[in-house]
Amino acid sequence: MKLTEASLRNPAAVAVVVAMVCAFGLMSLGKLPLQLFPDIERPQMSIQTSWRAASPQEMESEIVEPIETVMQGLPGLEEMASNVNAGNSSINLTFAVGSDMDAMLVEVLSRMNRLQPLPRDATPPVVQAGADNANNSLTYFFVQKLPGTRGDILDYRQFIEDRIVPRLTSVDGVAGVDINGGAEEELTITLDLARAAALGIQIPEVAAVAARATDVSGGVVEAGRREYVLRFAGRYSPEALGELILAWRDGRPVRLADVASVQVKRPEQRFFAYQNGNPAIGLRILRESGANVLNTLDQVKQVVAEVREQELRPRGLDIAQSFDASVFINRALGLLSGSLTVGVLLAVGCLWWFLRDVRATALIACAIPISLLATFIVLQLTGRSLNVISLAGLAFAVGMVMDAAVVVAENIVRLREQGLPPARAALEGTRQVGGALVASTLTTVAVFLPVIFMEDVEGQLFADLALTISIAVGISLLIAVTVLPAAAGSWLRTRPGEERQHRFWSRLSDWALKTTEGRTRQWGWVGALVLAPALLAALLMPQIDYLPPVKRAAVDAFFNFPPGMSPERVNREIAPVLLERMRPYMDGEKGPQLSNWYLNLWPGGGTLGARVVDPADIGELERIVRDEIVVGFPDTRAFASEGELFGSFGGSARAIAIHLQHGDGDALARAAESGRKLLAERFAGANVQAWPSADGGTPELRVNPDDRRLAEIGWRRPELGTVVRTLGDGQWLGEHFDGDRRLAIILRSGSEDDIAGLGAAPWPRRRAAC
């Protein structure tokens, strides 16, 4: 073999190449991103939209349907699924495997430009590559008050957004921070309906006049040798907005302050967060694709420690981490690294046991570190990461990378014992077994390498396994035909005391020949050696699964609250009960002792998560949460289970999705509810949920216009719509920019929040124009 001849002629060059591989391998090992799983890129795209105070029907007709129309006919589009809720919607686009997602993103953005103008108070649609899931979450933090701190935790939301979030997002590897708990402040105009009716001020007039109070640019005006920017400063400050003149009555102006109060405040809270029983603001840290998770987590923790001492504690606040992925990553990587180390020691130990030659064992064992370090180089060049899948591949490859070296070394020693010179024995020994080694290596690579070319989720998940094994085995072949022959001449030696070992193998071969003598015995051995393993494989076949159900020592519970129950009422009636039930376990009055727990509530649902100090108590905690904590709430469904370490990968293999479609929405809801009950009865203990909830939507209080009566008092339908919004969540009038932040201007009514108050709202007759 020419490669072997070149290695024998230039042993120094071989040594240099080996040293360079080791050096670059160690450098690559230090640069490889450390994370739990490989990056899974699904051919998906999402379009998020929001429109405050809009009903699902309005969201569907005004935003979702136009977007779906322009997206029809996208090349490679396999599925378009839309989820519509009150005030927001999500459209998920799934493309065929192998689609060029960069080109698809450009195509989707270009098609979005064809949309007709959306409602003024609707936020522009946000197009994101991929789908939002738990694997994008780096970690979770909760900001809460220290004992003795006055005020509400939500009073610090703007401070957190202005001072804390920018420092977290500046960390390399952090893609963004989601804030859960409270909403941004608004410039609210609260209208006194009775006072407005007494002065003959109509809600649409207030909305129209307040919305027109804005700055206007008039361009540029020349005056001599100078140019001046012409600008009308028509915008009111929040303090002066009350001086806005709405109308004149008996020669006197009616100002906005006469019929309304103006103030900057938070809207009604709809998202609630608790950490260890205390009101909190949740921070979800998102990671960038390909980021080094452990390194990023360490930097985030360092920034959080600085923020805690410099920004939060002086204001009576604290920040605590709820979910730390580094615990699981370090545990998984430590377990596999330990297995890899033990595998290396066992492989080398078994090799020495059979060879009984320290030099030969050391030379052959060199194939392990060289092959692994070369694999690290390839992983780094191909943009891979060091995760549980790639480490598992390295562990599998440890015993395989020595096969070729063992065969070459044994053949070289055999030829040297026959009297050939060292160089000649190295060349002839490698050449004699070279063809067989190439064939053996190719068969191994042919088993694993095709996985790399699978573009679906399974291929991306296990590609690191196939790549590490293929590269390590391929490198081991190069080592066997280059490095080992170059070192064998001066390093390997003939082995004394071979007669005793030869006698043992001679006796073993004589016994094998005797027991297989004759065609009948030969066929018997063949049948036994084939049927016995097949029978054992059938009897010992484990359960078939996607990934093993590895738990993460945490219990997660999910809630579906009664339809139409407001988040504020859930927080007032259900949250205190949950907090009181969990308090003894957090304080140590009852067992098992909790390390931390959290509660998140949002419109229609919520989640509770808890971790124990002793992982052995997780089963007891799961029973307590399922049977004692989340039970006893009328018309509320709750599901509790131990969290899966593999997240959506492992969980998706244990979930069955049933999609129902029908043109009649009411009939579809009834069928879904019937199916849910049947499945829950058939599979006891299973988590059976319907999405959207088949319990029925939020009850609707509909205002049906009487066009004749509207005409009699001089009103029109659009004006009535403005009134309805004002009486509800508020009418959006525009935005106010104070030089630092933008505030939505919302017109609300100051009437009681009940049906009787809505029905008794005064409606002034329109004044006839003079």
Image: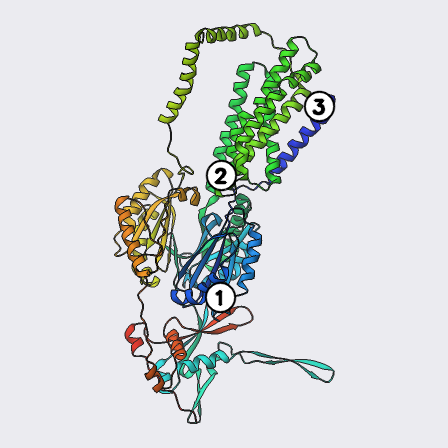
Q: Are marks 1 and 2 in contact (CB under 8 Å)?
A: no
What is the distance, in whole Å, between disc 1 and disc 2 at their CAs? 41 Å
Residue 235 in the image: above or below residue 681? below
- Depth check, front residue: 245 or 635: 635
Which of the 4 image quadrants contains residue 62?
bottom left
Q: Which mark is residue 330?
A: 2
Quadrant occupied by the C terminus: bottom left
- Depth check, front residue: 514 or 699: 514
For mark 2, give the secondary structure: helix
Residue type at the position of mark 2:
Asn
Q: Which residue is mark 1?
A: 123
How was the colour assigned to the protein in this rendering?
rainbow
Dot 1: within a 10 Å radius of its alpha carbon, few (fewer than 14), some, or many (20 or more) residues? some
- Which residue is drawn at the image coordinates 34% and 76% (left, top)? 751
Q: Is residue 591 among what the camera can see?
A: no
For mark 1, give the secondary structure: strand
Residue 752 in the image: above or below residue 109? below
For mark 3, give the secondary structure: helix
Residue type at the position of mark 1:
Thr
- In the image, taking residue 681 as reference, residue 240 lies left or right, namely right
Residue 144 in the image: above or below residue 442? below
In percent of width and height, residue 190 lies at 40, 76
Q: Which residue is mark 3?
A: 2
What is the distance, in whole Å, between disc 1 and disc 3 at their CAs? 68 Å
In percent of width and height, residue 321 lies at 45, 49
